Image (cartoon, rainbow, N blue to C red):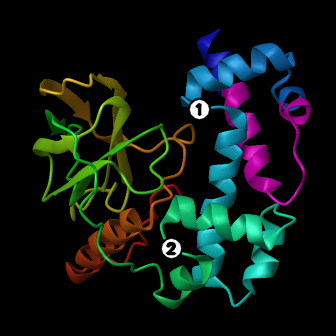
Amino acid sequence: MGDVIEKAVERVICALQENLGEQITMDDMARTAMFSKFHFSRMFLRVTGISPGRFLSALRLQEAKRLLLTTSMTVADISHLVGYNSIGTFSYRFRGSVGVSPTEYRQCRGMVAPLAAPEHDGDAVLRGHVWQSRGGAPGQVVVGLFPGRIAQGQPVSHVVLPGAGPFELTGVPAGSWHVLAHSVDVGHDSPNAGQPYVASFGPVEVSPTGGPIRDIDIWLRPRRIFDPPALLAQLDVAMWAARTRTRAAGRTDQAVLPGA
């Protein structure tokens, strides 16, 4: 049954990717999955970790990022093409998720400034270890703490690692958080070079009293179609940097942006 459900969810995600400009309803997605609307919503959440609506919104913004960097279309045309009727709504959601406006993202070609230090004054410290898959060679690893399963908006805490290894997230406020890690395989002798890698853990409950939380192990694995796109622009920078290093080593393969 698990394989049937995954195939149904994959079928829906593929349909979403091909019809981002359409007004897609939950009924439409359930029909594509060939399940009742009630069962479809539950199984989609179980497979992807987020609701169908949030997944669709993330796909739309990720496609907008791609179009901003690869076409000369206006922001208004791009917003319409990815399913937004209002350019104001599109720009607001883009900035909130990506971290900069659509125009800024295009002007800097996706190479935005590094993440700023968080302004939170929490007391908790999350420690753990990022492990790499056998045969993988992850480059720079960005580990961030987010309210949900999508890497979007300013993380409440983050750290950039040179590769897989131990990490520490400080100043964590009380709340429920997800640890999300993103990297790319830069193994020059590996057929997977350029492959985006992701890892997640959570939710992690942090009490108002704070205190250290230890032993969070997360494993980098190749990104699957069921993983929501990483929308935060600074994660694109890490991937582009890895691609540059890969090219400098003599490879000509095109790396894939996180979430593409």
Local SS, label 2: loop
What residue is shown at x 36% (from left), y 26% (from top)? 202
Q: Is residue 205 left or right of residue 228?
A: left
The span shown in magenta is 7-29
**Residue 114, x across and y down, in percent:** 29, 72
**Residue 119, x across and y down, in percent:** 28, 56
Q: Is residue 211 left or right of residue 79?
A: left
Q: Main secondary structure of the magenta part?
A: helix
Is 238 above or below relative to 108?
Answer: above
Instruction: Identify the amino acid type marked 1.
Output: Ile
Local SS, label 1: loop
What residue is shown at x 25% (from left), y 32% (from top)? 218
- Read off the residue under disc 1: 50
Q: Quick one: label 1, few (<14), some, or many (20+) residues within 10 Å?
A: some
Does 14 lie within the magenta span?
A: yes
Q: Which mark is residue 235?
A: none
Instruction: Identify the amino acid type marked 2.
Output: Val
C-alpha distance separating marks 1 and 2: 24 Å
What residue is shown at x 28% (from left), y 40% (from top)? 220
- Which sits in the foreground, 92 or 36? 92
- Read off the residue under disc 2: 100
Is 106 above or below relative to 3?
Answer: below
